[in-house]
Amino acid sequence: MLNAKNAFKDIAEELSAYKEITSKLKMKYDCALNEIKDLQSEQNGEKEDLMIQLRQQDLDIKFYTKVVDMVMKPEELAKLKMKS
C-alpha cells in the first residue's frame, strides 16, 4: 500500500492518500486489540472455571479419603493399594 507508485498532483493529495491508509491501518489495529482483549477475557473465564473444578475435586478427594478411613481398617486399605 505504502509503496504504490501513484502520481499525485500535489502534496495535499498525497497527504490525503496517506491519511486514508493510516486510518484504515488504525482501524485494523483497533480491531486486533479488541480481539486480543476478547480472547484474554475468554481465557480468564475458562481458567477460573478450571480452578473451581480443581478445588471441588480436591474437596471430593478429601471427603472420600475420610469415608474410606472410617469404613476400612488400615490393613485392608494397604492390601487394596497393593492389589491396585
Image (cartoon, rainbow, N blue to C red):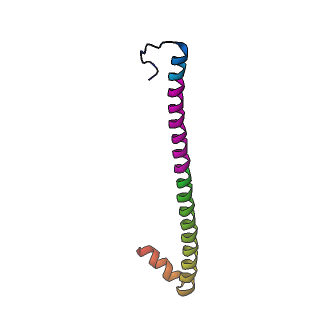
In the rendered image, the vertical position of residue 69 relative to residue 59, given as above or below? below
In the rendered image, the vertical position of residue 2 relative to residue 60, given as above or below? above
Where is residue 60? Give x, y as percent: 55, 75
Q: Name the one closer to the observer, 26 or 53.
A: 26
In the rendered image, the vertical position of residue 52 relative to residue 9, given as above or below? below
Q: Which residues are magenta?
A: 18-39
Question: What residue is rendered at 56% in x and 71% in y?
Answer: 56
The question of residue 30 being in magenta is answered with yes
Where is residue 19? Give x, y as percent: 54, 25
Quarter of the image with the C terminus is bottom left
- Which quarter of the picture shows residue 5? top left
Question: What residue is rendered at 54% in x and 74% in y?
Answer: 61
Count every numbered label the image shows and give the total. Answer: 0
The kind of secondary structure the magenta stretch mainly shows is helix
Q: Report the side of 84 relative to 13 (left or right).
A: left
Quarter of the image with the N terminus is top left
Where is residue 57? Give x, y as percent: 54, 70
In the rendered image, the vertical position of residue 38 relative to residue 33, given as above or below? below
Where is residue 11? Give x, y as percent: 54, 14
Q: Report the side of 5 relative to 45 (left or right).
A: left
Q: Name the one closer to the observer, 72 or 27.
A: 27
Question: What residue is rendered at 55% in x and 58% in y?
Answer: 47
